[in-house]
Image (tube, rainbow, N blue to C red):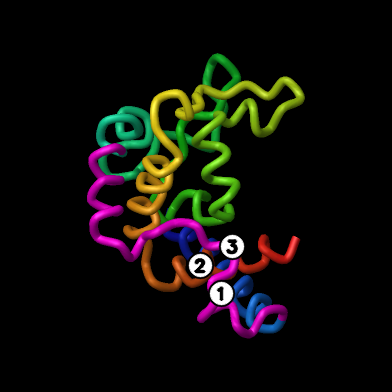
Amino acid sequence: MRRDVMMGLAGGVALIGLGVVLWPAAATEAPGQILRWQDPQVVAEGAELYDRFCASCHGAELEGQPNWRERNAAGRLPAPPHDVTGHTWHHADALLIDITTRGTAAVVGRGYESDMPGFGDVMTEDQIIAVLSFIKSTWPAEVIAAHDQMNAMSALE
């Protein structure tokens, strides 16, 4: 697991370097950034909502389900972690909001099956943003920086 974290962080550092070359002002302007991970009220609301709607699958400590990279008997992937060991931070804010709102299968399409439902009928967009803001608030600074660069690059698309 430690190797996975280090490889993920190395990838994040590479993204930061690429982002600096492609978008030098990204760190100050934060294009593409929607999450409000620095707002204590939003994060507190997100923590409560995460406990209510997400922790049963993704874990109280954002640790995900065991063997989350291996398909289960139903052929579906278990819930991934949302901490630094997972891949949540590899996706821009807009995509994370879309997945949480519509569910993984709806976003991926082409018959993809997932146990991740959409929460758009259960939570408002602001509540979904609060949950994702809470998740981001738990990441180390270098992962947050890499995620911010991911947002900046997605804003260019």
Q: Which of marks 3 and 1 is nearer the N terminus?
A: 1
- The quadrant of the rendering that contains the C terminus is bottom right
| Mark 2: secondary structure | helix
Q: Distance between the residues labelled 3 and 1?
A: 19 Å
C-beta proximity under 8 Å, tags 2 and 1: yes
The front one of 51 and 60 is 51
Q: Is residue 122 left or right of residue 20?
A: left
Residue shown at 51%/81% (left/top)?
28
Residue shown at 58%/50% (left/top)?
94
The front one of 70 and 34 is 34
Q: Give how far across and how far down residue 139 sits, in percent.
A: 37, 61
Q: Give how far across and how far down residue 80 sits, in percent.
A: 46, 39
Q: In this view, does 73 lie to the left or right of 2?
A: right
Compared to residue 12, the image places residue 81 above or below, namely above
Q: What stretch is highlighted in magenta?
A: 22-49
Disc 3 residue type (three-letter): Gly
User: Residue tagged by mark 3?
Assistant: 32
Residue shown at 56%/37% (left/top)?
99
The front one of 17 and 129 is 129
Disc 2 residue type (three-letter): Leu
| Mark 3: secondary structure | loop
Disc 1 residue type (three-letter): Val
User: Residue tagged by mark 1?
Assistant: 13
| Mark 1: secondary structure | helix
- Pointer 3 local density, CA inside 10 Å: few below 14, some 14–19, many at least 20: some
